[in-house]
Image (tube, helix red, strand yellow):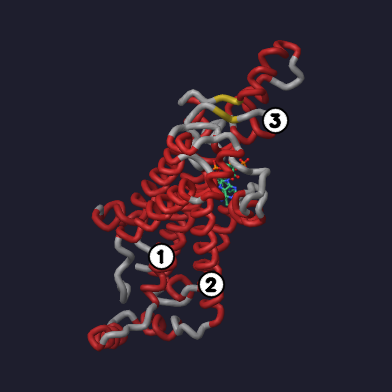
């Protein structure tokens, strides 16, 4: 098996996420604009430390800063369909990168592709269960209800309507237990711990794409040190004839490869920026940190744990190896 010429990223790179949240949250306290926004939305700075109505009340309609609006173009067309962008960027890696496209033996290539798809399926399943569906409302919504949250105005309505309500009981339950249905029914999703779906998804998506892109890039990178060059030429003389093509095919002048990498790093860059905006303009500290913790836990299982746990590594693989 051909091994990567560079090491995979050290876990310490993940510190970029808590640092982003910390800087964003501090900025939201220090900046006069952000403080004014909080004041006008009825949330005191101290409120930022405790579960509150923050996500619903925050400045969505008062455009103090463009990125503080929920309907800003990047939120609507990028974050709100963020997993679609993640899927496209990941697919482009599979299609364009030599590690998956043209290198090595057929068997090695098939294994790499299968394991990459498995990592994607794992990340997608966690995203899906956390934010979209968990045998009914998503885990984030269930967590919110369990911690005392409810759909406030709609609760009153349902209680008043009683048995003559036009909606089916299951539709009423959906309204009461899911954030999206609550907001669509004109209610306020308030009172519990509302893990930030934005923080969770943006951290998971950007870390997933970064580890995948750096992994396949490391595999394909031309050697730089004399020692590496010696290794590389030995590899070329090795018994794996197909590995000959790796460095040739990984030529950084390959326009398709560069285009795909630009898409991936574009999604990662914009994802990081939107994470920073969420850290400044939305949610309480605790809600941001819990979104971060769930995402980093998933990243740990996907990319850090396989480095020390061989049986798991055999199943899920390591990008580009
Ligand atoms: C033990 C049982 C296991 C069952 C496992 C089921 C797992 C199912 C796995 C996959 C399901 C198929 C999904 C495939 C998706 C592939 C293509 C796409 O990505 S289409 C999706 C496009 N939609 C999005 O990207 C939505 C992204 N947005 C969000 O998740 C949310 O808006 C938010 C979290 C960013 C914010 O939440 P909000 O409440 O503030 O809107
Ligand atoms: N960076 C960002 N830009 C715009 N809106 C954001 C945002 N981060 C969070 N929000 C909004 O804040 C609310 C809570 O987000 P979340 O729980 O996913 O972190 C959501 O409102 P809506 O649900 O009304 O769209 C979401 O759209």
Q: Are marks 3 and 1 in contact (CB under 8 Å)?
A: no
| Quadrant placement of the C terminus | bottom left
Q: Which is more foreground, mark 1 or mark 2?
A: 2
Which residue does the numbered mark 1 point to in the structure image? 112
Tally of numbered tags: 3
Q: Horizontally, is 222 left or right of 65 in the view?
A: left
Pointer 2 local density, CA inside 10 Å: few below 14, some 14–19, many at least 20: few
Res 16 seen here: yes
Task: Please tell me which residue is depicted at 65% across the width and 55% down the height of the picture.
Answer: 77
Q: CA distance from mark 3 to mark 2?
A: 40 Å
x%, y% of residue 1? 30, 72
- Looking at the image, residue 119 lies above or below residue 175: below
Question: Tag 2's secondary structure?
Answer: helix
Task: Please tell me which residue is depicted at 47% across the width and 25% down the height of the picture.
Answer: 146
Give me the disc on residue 186.
3
Of label 1 and label 2, which has the lower sequence position? Answer: 1
Question: Tag 1's secondary structure?
Answer: helix
Question: Tag 3's secondary structure?
Answer: loop
Give me the disc on residue 262.
2
Q: CA distance from mark 3 to mark 1?
A: 47 Å
Q: Horizontally, is 305 left or right of 153 in the view?
A: left
Most foreground residue, 107 or 1: 1
Task: Please tell me which residue is depicted at 34% across the width and 49% down the height of the picture.
Answer: 301
x%, y% of residue 195? 48, 38
Res 201 seen here: no
Q: Horizontally, is 201 left or right of 184 in the view?
A: left
Most foreground residue, 233 or 237: 233
Of label 3 and label 1, which has the lower sequence position? Answer: 1
Give me the disc on residue 278.
none
- Looking at the image, residue 217 lies above or below residue 248: above
């Amino acid at each position: 098996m051909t091994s990567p010429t560079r090491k995979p990223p050290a876990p310490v790179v993940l510190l970029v996420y808590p640092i982003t949240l910390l800087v964003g949250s501090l900025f939201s306290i220090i900046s006069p604009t952000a403080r004014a926004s909080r004041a006008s939305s009825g949330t005191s700075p101290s409120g930022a430390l405790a579960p509150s109505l923050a996500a619903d009340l925050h400045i969505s309609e008062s455009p103090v800063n463009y990125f503080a609006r929920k309907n800003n173009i990047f939120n609507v067309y990028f974050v709100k369909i963020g997993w679609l962008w993640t899927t496209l960027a990941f697919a482009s890696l599979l299609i364009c990168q030599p590690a998956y496209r043209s290198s090595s033996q057929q068997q090695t290539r098939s294994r790499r592709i299968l394991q990459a798809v498995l990592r994607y399926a794992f990340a997608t399943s966690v995203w899906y269960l956390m934010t979209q569906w968990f045998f009914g409302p998503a885990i984030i919504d269930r967590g919110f209800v369990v911690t005392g949250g409810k759909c406030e105005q709609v609760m009153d309505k349902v209680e008043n309507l009683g048995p003559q309500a036009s909606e089916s009981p299951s539709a009423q339950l959906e309204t009461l237990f899911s954030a999206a249905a609550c907001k669509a029914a004109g209610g306020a999703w308030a009172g519990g711990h509302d893990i930030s779906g934005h923080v969770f998804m943006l951290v998971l998506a950007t870390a997933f794409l970064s580890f995948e892109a750096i992994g396949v890039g490391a595999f394909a990178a031309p050697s730089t040190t004399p020692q590496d060059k010696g290794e590389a030429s030995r590899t070329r003389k090795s018994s794996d004839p197909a590995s000959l093509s790796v460095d040739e095919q990984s030529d950084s002048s390959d326009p398709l490869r560069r285009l795909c990498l630009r898409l991936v790093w574009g999604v990662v860059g914009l994802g990081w920026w939107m994470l920073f905006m969420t850290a400044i303009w939305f949610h309480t500290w605790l809600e941001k940190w819990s979104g971060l913790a769930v995402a980093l836990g998933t990243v740990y299982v996907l990319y850090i744990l396989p480095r020390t746990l061989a049986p798991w590594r055999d199943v899920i693989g390591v990008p580009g190896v």
